[in-house]
Image (cartoon, helix red, strand yellow):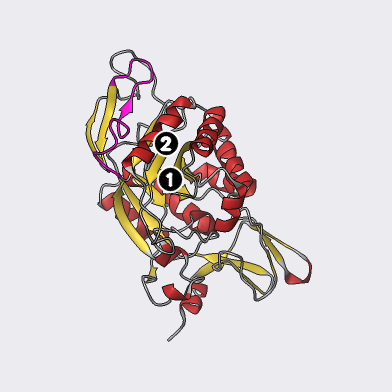
Amino acid sequence: MPSLAEELDSRTTKGVLYERLPEQAVRCYACGHNCLIRPGRRGICKVRFNSGGVLRVPHGYVAGLQNDPVEKKPFFHLLPGSGALTFGMLGCDFHCGYCQNWLTSQALRDPECDGIGAAVHPIRAEQVVTAAVRCGAEVVVSSYNEPLISSEWAVDIFRLARARGLRTAFVSNGNATPRALEYLRPHLDAIKIDLKAMRDKTYRALGGTLAATLSTIQMAHSMGLWVEVVTLVVPGLNDGPEELMEAGRFLAGVSPEIPWHVTAFHSDYRMRQTANTSVATLLQAAEIGQEAGLQFVYAGNLPGAVSNYETTSCPGCRRPLVERRGFFVFSNSLTRDGRCPDCGSAIPGIWTQRRAEAPPARAGAESLA
């Protein structure tokens, strides 16, 4: 019986985000590590590898496929209340001790994951999109593990999804490169980025750098992607008021219209002894975000306990526009073009579905377009 690594290696294709170097080495540009990978070796993510001077990358399988509420991603300004057909693979370029998807993200890195929760399900890109259409999803999302390390697979799916009128999104740690974002941009509508801390020391302990994440937020916004940002507020790690204020001010400096989700930590993986985030701490973080100048601040993972921080309100007249509890939308009074019905203020976000492309005419048939 093949090992998990052998199984994954058999479900790969030639990569796009890399360059060839002397002596059959390659440089991978899928994430901010920019790994130099020599023949027979793997990148930090463990799933992109060098085979005879060619970078092989994940393709043609999922480890998870589920139609989630788009609010679970979380996206609050992307087609509220819609279904998000979400697919994930295995591997990650980070090693966060509090990862809630560690059975998939750390599958080739952590021996504890061996043989647990790492099922590989072969599937074609067309089948993923067909599943989305059949279950009534309006968004197709790459998530569950780090999507940047499987960007080529995501693009193959997203290209088909957009042709069917679906929106597309990434749920990412933000350790991107300009080359990766430029590759994704023609096929991607929205990206959720984790801003895990405002201390580089913290980031390096998790496997990345603060500068790379801040740069990704700025690049994604400047490219016209819809950006929402999440900070998991972890007691003793990043919950200091000064650090939270730094995060809020940075985001407001990029754009005060960026939604910031401050979410509650619960003990998991290698941080089972850390206390869960309290309601008071989460509310303080949300208040700090507003004080920093952000127009849309949300508190997550404690549904019903965070005052009005689950609701999208008009920044002009403060009318509640999209009322939620947890992942569920109870009311949506936005106009069809995403405006407040009272004062007419335009609310930033993606509120309409894409238009499906007309299928190509069959050979020998006349087009009616």
Considering the whole magenta stretch, tell me its main secondary structure. Answer: loop
Please say whether residue 361 is visible from this viewpoint.
no
> 54 and 237: which one is in front?
237
* Above/below status of 341 relative to 177: above
- Tag 1 secondary structure: strand
Image coords of residue 255 (percent x, y): 52, 28
Decide whether residue 311 is among the magenta residues. Answer: yes
Q: Which residue is mark 2?
A: 285
- Which residue of the protein is positioned furthest toward the top in this rendering? 343
Query: Where is the N terminus found, in terms of image quarters?
Result: bottom left
Q: Amino acid at mark 2?
A: Ala
Q: Which mark is residue 222?
A: none
Q: Which residue is mark 1?
A: 233
Query: Where is the C terminus found, in terms of image quarters?
Result: top left
- Tag 2 secondary structure: helix
Please say if the residues under marks 2 and 1 sit with CB atoms less than 8 Å apart.
yes
> 166 and 316: which one is in front?
316
Residue at 51% x, 44% y is 195
Residues shaded magenta: 302-319
Please say whether residue 150 is visible from this viewpoint.
yes
Residue at 53% x, 39% y is 243
Image coords of residue 300 (percent x, y): 34, 42
Q: Earlier in the sequence, mark 2 or mark 1?
A: 1
Q: Amino acid at mark 1?
A: Val
Residue at 26% x, 39% y is 305
